[in-house]
Image (spheres, helix red, strand yellow):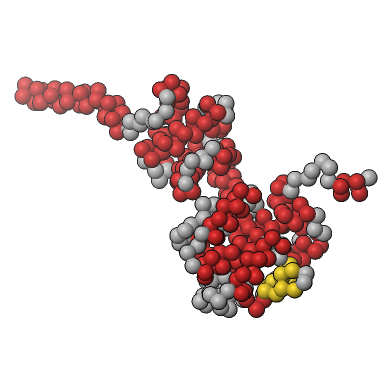
Amino acid sequence: MSDEADERRERQLEVMKRMAEREPEVLAAAHYDYTPKMPADQWAAIRPYVRRVVRDTAPRTPYSEKELYPAVSRLALFAWAVANVPLEDDNVFDPRFINRFVQHHLGQYSRAGKNTLRARLRRTSEALLGDEAAGTFRALGKAEASRPYTPSEVASLLSWASSQHDEERTTSAGALLALGLGAGLTGREIIDLELVNITSDSRGVAVRVSGDEARNVPVLAQWAPFLQRRTASKAASRWAFRSGQRGGNINLVTDFVSRNPRPAVELQSRRMRATWIVEHLRRGTPLDLLLEVAGLQSAEALDRLLPYVARADDDPRRYSLR
């Protein structure tokens, strides 16, 4: 081999050596440099864990490191500083722990903000914990859809209904709440109900539901005035909810609440129905009658709602058990 060839080979080896020496630096530079808005001592405590999680999971999620850092750092800070949970994946990214964090410790966030944070934490959890986490998130999602509204949430929905800008929307919003929270109708049943199927007499207001689960449903007294106003309104024609609709539009409720003014609390017909059922269970409505007016075939459908039925220690019905 000539001296010239030897020199060329030496130069190539030297270039490769320098590239190898720089590779860790290049890889490090490729990571996002995140500095959160939190006290320096807190960030110093959780930084190693947050950085490891983000760098490990970002390639396995639809999100970049920049998008994951705020969500992961907030969750880790809550785990370390508030919940006193060890910074270990099985603890911090347990779907139930994430659900608790989003529901109860993000009060300053808008609904959209909460949903964004939840989605990023969910994908991170699934990347770390696998299929088991994915299954738990699905189960929690179903449970959340059946969670009754709290009194403060109901008050918020009432405020939303009264803030509509015209008679048609105001009476439609009131009827929507009354049919869901006061009669337990499903979303489809609310959309399909016609004004002629709302009746009023000395005993109160009732609605006649048609279809596969045809039945008469007495409306809870506090919600009856909303339906009476709707039936008396000149803005209403044919339909109990949304005059001018053609019937059968399964997205009618979603379309209605998506327009300004929007409710501060997410309005879901399943949660309204759950709230109505729980109210009857708390009142002690006989089970056979409740199943009949709810259009249910079996009491098993009530199982997931029983945890929300709190019994007072001085409930007089306890004496009948002795």
Please tell me which residue is depicted at 62% across the width and 74% down the height of the picture: 231
Residue 269 vertical placement versus 249 (above, below): above
Along the viewing direction, whichever of 200 and 45 lies nearer the viewer: 200
Residue 33 vertical placement versus 117 (above, below): above
Quarter occupied by residue 91: top right
Q: Quadrant of the C terminus?
A: top right
Residue 243 vertical placement versus 51 (above, below): below
Q: Position of residue 68 (x, y in %)?
A: 41, 38
Please tell me which residue is depicted at 9% across the width and 22% down the height of the picture: 7
Q: Position of residue 173 (x, y in %)?
A: 56, 64
Q: Position of residue 191 (x, y in %)?
A: 58, 70
Please tell me which residue is depicted at 82% across the width and 41% down the height of the picture: 313
Along the viewing direction, whichever of 201 and 206 lies nearer the viewer: 201
Q: Is residue 308 left or right of residue 27?
A: right
Q: Position of residue 78 (x, y in %)?
A: 52, 31
Query: What is the tally of numbered marks visible in this picture?
Result: 0
* Residue at the farthest right position: 322
Quarter occupied by residue 63: top left
Q: Quadrant of the N terminus?
A: top left
Along the viewing direction, whichever of 38 and 168 lies nearer the viewer: 168
Q: Is residue 208 visible?
A: no
Residue 134 vertical placement versus 37 (above, below): below
Please tell me which residue is depicted at 49% across the width and 37% down the height of the picture: 128
Q: Is residue 120 visible?
A: yes
Q: Is residue 261 left or right of residue 11?
A: right
